[in-house]
Amino acid sequence: IIYSLFRRAIFSIEIPLGVLHKSAVTNTPMIANLLHDKKVIIADDDAIAVDNLAQVLESWGMKVSIVLSVEMLKEIIREEGFFDLVLSDYHLGMSEENGLRLLQTACEMQSAQPPVCIFVTGATTIDLINKASEANIKLLHKPIRPARLRLLLNNLFAAIHENPTMNDI
């Protein structure tokens, strides 16, 4: 009787996952290529947050520039041309400056090809959420999870890749 209590049975089941069609592979852009070589502006008055975010974006092959004000943004766009993405905190450390104005300026300067604009902020007020929504700006709350940011960026750039004339992301 004791022997039968210690007996074990081992089973194995194979289930096919499905068939991958060649057309599905060739028509889907590679995730790594969606972020690689994209030009990014980061606007934030927190040097540590900027440094950390810049390191993450650069590790994905993105080209990062940092600004602290709307005037710096204007200057860098005039010097370096269009940017694909602008990430900005709402509070930029100056009473007359804020991330909403900075992101709107970036879109105005690049009206033919607006950048993807994202608020990256610790502020969680309803007022800010409404302002972002009205301006069609994505909102991410700090602390930023790199995996979540990468997923968001890939989804946004994939949508643009599928429809290059898409201005309303």
Image (cartoon, helix red, strand yellow):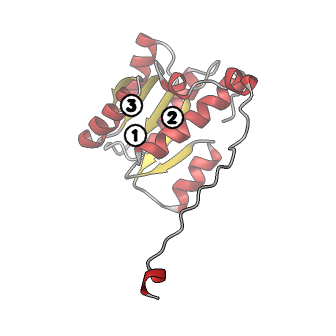
- Amino acid carrying mark 3 in the image: Leu
Residue depicted at x 65% and y 18%? 112
Is 49 on the left or on the right of 121, as rendered? left
Up the image or down, 109 lies above or below 97; here it is above
The residue shown at (54%, 62%) is 126
Percent x, y for residue 12?
Answer: 59, 56
Say if mark 3 contacts mark 2, CB within 8 Å: no
Give, as a three-letter code, the residue at label 2: Leu
Nearer the observer, 17 or 27: 17
159 is higher (above) or lower (below) than 131: above
- Residue corresponding to mark 3: 57
Residue lying at 69% horizontally and 44% vertically, measured from the top left: 16
- Residue ID for mark 2: 103
118 versus 33 height, above or below: below
Disc 1 versus disc 3: distance between alpha carbons?
A: 25 Å
Q: Mark 1 — residue?
A: 97
Residue 129 percent across, percent down from the top left:
55, 55
Give the mark nearest the N terminus, 2 or 1: 1
- In the rendered structure, which disc, 1 or 3, sits on the residue that comes first in sequence? 3
Callout 2 secondary element: helix
Element at badge 3? helix
Cα distance in 3D space between marks 2 and 1: 11 Å
